[in-house]
Image (cartoon, rainbow, N blue to C red):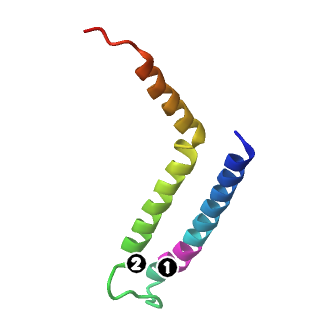
């Protein structure tokens, strides 16, 4: 892994953890609102759990992209595809 790739990956991980922290902060503020019965925070267009669910799904996709499908995975897939093309075709 070269310096530019490592630098980009480090920035992406930092942004991911930042968005995860903000999500957790909002979840802590919104979920107990329903538990204690006081409606301090209300959304008229969407239910707050739908918003948290969509936001959580987006964070899950970012995590999969960042940790599962990283540059090493991409490099392995490129090498695999290149090896496929090198095989001779017998008619």
Q: Residue at x 47, y 91 (%)?
A: 40
Which quarter of the figure is the N terminus placed in?
top right
- Expressed as whole percent of the image width and height from the top left, the position of residue 12 reads 63, 57
Q: Residue at x 71, y 52 (%)?
A: 7
Circle on res. 55: none
Q: Residue at x 44, y 18 (%)?
A: 86
Q: Which residue is mark 1?
A: 30
**Label whose residue precedes the other's in the sequence (1 or 2):** 1
Q: Which residue is mark 2?
A: 48
- Expressed as whole percent of the image width and height from the top left, the position of residue 73 reads 54, 36
Q: Main secondary structure of the magenta part?
A: helix
Give the structural element (helix, strand or loop) at label 2: helix
- Residue nearest the viewer, comparing 79 with 14: 79
Quadrant of the rendered structure where residue 81 is?
A: top left
- Expressed as whole percent of the image width and height from the top left, the position of residue 46 reads 33, 80
The stretch drawn in magenta includes residue 31: yes
Q: In the image, 47: left or right of 78?
A: left
- The magenta region covers 25-32
Label pair 1/2, CB-CB below 8 angstroms = yes
Q: In the image, 6: left or right of 58?
A: right
Q: CA distance from mark 1 to mark 2?
A: 7 Å
- Residue nearest the viewer, comparing 11 with 26: 11
């Amino acid at each position: 892994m070269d310096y530019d790739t490592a630098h980009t990956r480090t920035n992406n991980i930092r942004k991911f953890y930042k968005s995860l922290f903000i999500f957790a902060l909002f979840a802590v503020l919104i979920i107990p609102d329903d538990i204690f019965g006081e409606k301090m925070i209300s959304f008229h267009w969407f239910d707050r759990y739908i918003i948290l669910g969509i936001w959580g799904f987006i964070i899950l996709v970012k995590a999969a992209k960042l940790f599962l499908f990283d540059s090493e995975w991409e490099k392995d897939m490129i090498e695999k595809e290149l090896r496929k093309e090198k095989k001779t075709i017998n008619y």
